[in-house]
Image (cartoon, rainbow, N blue to C red):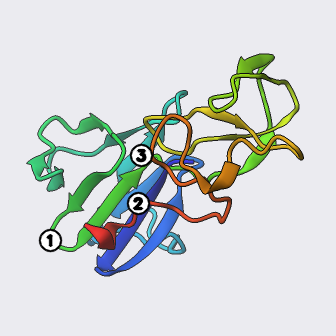
Amino acid sequence: MPHLWMSQDPPSWSILNLTQPVTLLSAADGVPLSPADDSLTVQAIRLVACPNEEHVLIAPRDVRIRINGDPLDTGIRALSDRDEIRVGPAGHLFYSTEAVAAVVPFPEDSMPCARCGDPIVKGEPAVRCPEPNCRAWHHQKPGLECWTFENTPCARCDRTTTLDGALRFRPEDL
């Protein structure tokens, strides 16, 4: 699930899951909103979800925003995984499309497992690699634990195959 790492005082970061459009900045005072702060309702910057789980940042041209160090001159930009967003002098955010590995019922009709090659059929327990550039499906049912197989990485990338619910990307590691 896409989310924002937000901080007004790095290295203290909070996570905001992006399940709906989000207001990032109050036009009244130019301070990024915290995930719990709904007292400011003037909307200046919005993140709008697209059907493919990506987001577009939309802002008025008079708001000073930098994405990965470059000014946002056009007022609109499609975001990519790990984009750094600077809002004025105080707001510091990172956009991330990383998900957490989880066992879920396989949603499609059939697909070969990335590790063993046998078909994963609809409804079977499976794990989709959370790495944004991979997203490979693996079996994860009793007797066929392809995702957690012998503590090896994902069959298609170097992602660790734990089911601990931890995110791999953390802004403080930059």
Q: Report the Cα–Cα distance between label 1 and label 2.
A: 24 Å
Q: Could you tell me the amino acid type at mark 2?
A: Phe
Q: Report the Cα–Cα distance between label 2 and label 3.
A: 20 Å
Q: Report the Cα–Cα distance between label 3 and label 1.
A: 20 Å
* Mark 1, secondary structure of its residue: loop
Residue 148 x/y as whole percent: 69, 51
Residue 123 x/y as whole percent: 88, 31
Q: Which residue is mark 2?
A: 169
* Mark 3, secondary structure of its residue: strand
Tell me what residue is drawn at x 81 percent, y 17 percent: 109
Q: Callout 1: few (<14), some (14-19), or many (20+) C-alpha neighbours within 10 Å?
A: few
In this rendered view, identify the residue nearer to me: 132 or 162: 162
Q: Which residue is mark 1?
A: 89
* Mark 2, secondary structure of its residue: loop
From the viewer's perspective, tell me whether residue 60 is left or right of residue 164: left
Q: Which residue is mark 3?
A: 47
